């Protein structure tokens, strides 16, 4: 053993082994230290922030610019703490500087400001193409387009309207301002029954081809008020019929339960209506006097204040004939004999007309026919035939006079 330690080669071997062991220990400690350091947030990190606002530096009193995106994507690289702070606070600026450029087309680089020294920033895109143009400002009249008017409730229509203000000031490049053909607001009035009071609506700008233009406006919204009207008028009501009453009946009277009705519709519709008829009543199906429920025959889009239903009263007149009613002889002398020459038989036919309920109940024995021969001498005589019956009907006999021959 002593010989080994006195050997020069053995000492060298032991020294080499100790050196290797010392290196491993130091390397392990450094690696562990680095890992521990990383744990406290000092290693590098990369993150991308989308939709970072892109500012424009330009002489805004003289020029306007197009082609500048609203936002860009920014990638930041640095320590964990710096990257986290940049993502959360976004306290740096991304911009394009156009202050030294004149009108025309330019390719410009997107720049940054207020970026911490320990951060690296990468922007996508790095450069953009822009067009700088002379600034133009002009005042335009605002018009209104009321959409879905055909979806207003029946009888309603758009009346007068007002926009406040009715002009806007538009600022953009001269080429854009020269393209402006239409400045308007769109107001949806579908289903409205009440007027619009002070509704705020955005203003839209279009060129002659109907393309919407992006411009700066003052104001960007206007206030609209509009009348939603429900015009009405009163018109007479008439009853429409079709067909014919059954034989023996005639129409004495027909009347709706109201003489006039208030109808609602657009002004144009109402101007064309002077009266309103009922739906046709089929007289061939009417058998007696009474009341019938029917509807008003209204044009599309026109409504009545009390609705469509209406009651119609009908009064029928019936005509009926009673045949062979015997003609009695009044005041014939005791020694006299009478013979009828005309008519040959002492009877007549009686035709009556009147209210159908009354006439339908009459019978033959409700009538009495007679001739009065009081004071007449022997010979031929024309005497009136008198017919008696109910007083509330019209009675007509087939024979007004009779020719009789009186003998003894």
Image (spheres, rainbow, N blue to C red):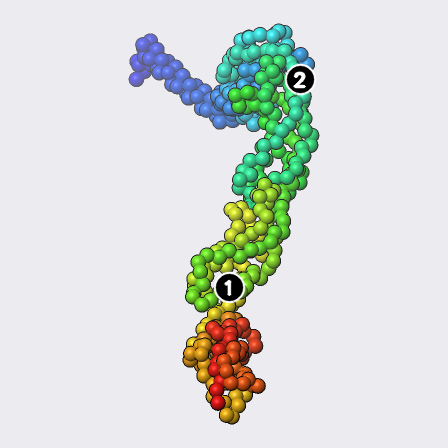
* Image mark for residue 251: 1
Give the CA distance from mark 1 to mark 2: 79 Å
Residue 17: x and y in percent read 35, 16
Crowd rating for badge 1 (residues with CA inside 10 Å; few <14, some 14–19, many 20+)? some
- The residue that appears at 59% across and 59% down in the rendered structure is 258
First along the sequence among labels 1 and 2: 2
Taking depth in this image into account, of 238 and 270 the one nearest to the observer is 238
Taking depth in this image into account, of 52 and 108 the one nearest to the observer is 108
Task: Identify the residue under disc 2.
Answer: 137
Q: Is residue 252 above or below residue 84?
A: below
Residue 43: x and y in percent read 49, 21
Q: Is residue 156 visible?
A: no
State left or right for residue 135 relative to residue 363.
right
Q: Is residue 396 above or below residue 100?
A: below
Taking depth in this image into account, of 109 and 245 the one nearest to the observer is 245
- The residue that appears at 48% across and 89% down in the rendered structure is 408
Q: Is residue 271 above or below residue 220?
A: below
State left or right for residue 318 relative to residue 111.
left
């Amino acid at each position: 053993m002593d010989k080994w330690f006195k050997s020069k080669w053995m000492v060298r071997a032991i020294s080499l082994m100790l050196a290797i062991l010392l290196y491993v220990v130091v390397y392990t400690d450094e690696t562990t230290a680095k890992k521990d350091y990383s744990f406290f947030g000092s290693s590098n990190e990369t993150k991308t922030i989308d939709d970072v606002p892109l500012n424009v530096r330009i002489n805004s009193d003289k020029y306007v610019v197009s082609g500048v995106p609203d936002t860009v994507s920014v990638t930041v690289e640095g320590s964990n703490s710096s990257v986290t702070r940049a993502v959360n606070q976004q306290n740096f600026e991304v911009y394009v500087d156009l202050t030294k450029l004149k009108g025309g087309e330019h390719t410009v680089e997107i720049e940054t400001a207020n970026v911490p020294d320990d951060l690296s920033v990468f922007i996508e895109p790095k450069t953009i193409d822009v067009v700088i143009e002379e600034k133009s400002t002009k005042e335009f009249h605002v018009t209104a387009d009321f959409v879905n008017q055909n979806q207003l409730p029946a009888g309603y229509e758009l009346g007068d309207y007002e926009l406040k203000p009715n002009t806007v000031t538009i600022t953009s490049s001269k080429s854009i301002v020269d393209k402006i053909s239409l400045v308007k607001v769109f107001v949806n009035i579908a289903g409205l029954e009440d007027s619009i009071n002070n509704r705020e609506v955005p203003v839209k700008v279009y060129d002659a081809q109907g393309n919407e233009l992006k411009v700066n406006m003052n104001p960007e919204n206007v206030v609209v008020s509009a009348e939603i009207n429900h015009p009405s008028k009163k018109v007479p009501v008439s009853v429409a019929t079709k067909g014919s009453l059954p034989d023996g009946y005639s129409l004495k009277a027909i009347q709706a339960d109201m003489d006039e009705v208030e109808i609602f519709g657009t002004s144009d519709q109402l101007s064309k209506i002077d009266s309103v008829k009922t739906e046709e009543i089929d007289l061939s199906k009417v058998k007696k006097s009474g009341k019938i429920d029917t509807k008003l025959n209204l044009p599309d889009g026109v409504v009545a204040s009390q609705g469509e239903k209406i009651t119609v009263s009908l009064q029928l007149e019936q005509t009926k004939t009673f045949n062979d009613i015997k003609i009695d002889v009044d005041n014939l002398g005791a020694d006299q004999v009478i013979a009828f020459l005309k008519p040959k038989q002492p009877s007549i036919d009686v035709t009556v007309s009147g209210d159908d309920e009354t006439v339908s109940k009459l019978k033959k024995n409700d009538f009495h026919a007679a001739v009065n021969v009081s004071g007449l001498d022997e010979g031929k005589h024309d005497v009136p035939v008198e017919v008696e019956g109910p007083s509330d009907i019209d009675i007509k006999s087939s024979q007004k006079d009779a020719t009789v021959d009186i003998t003894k």
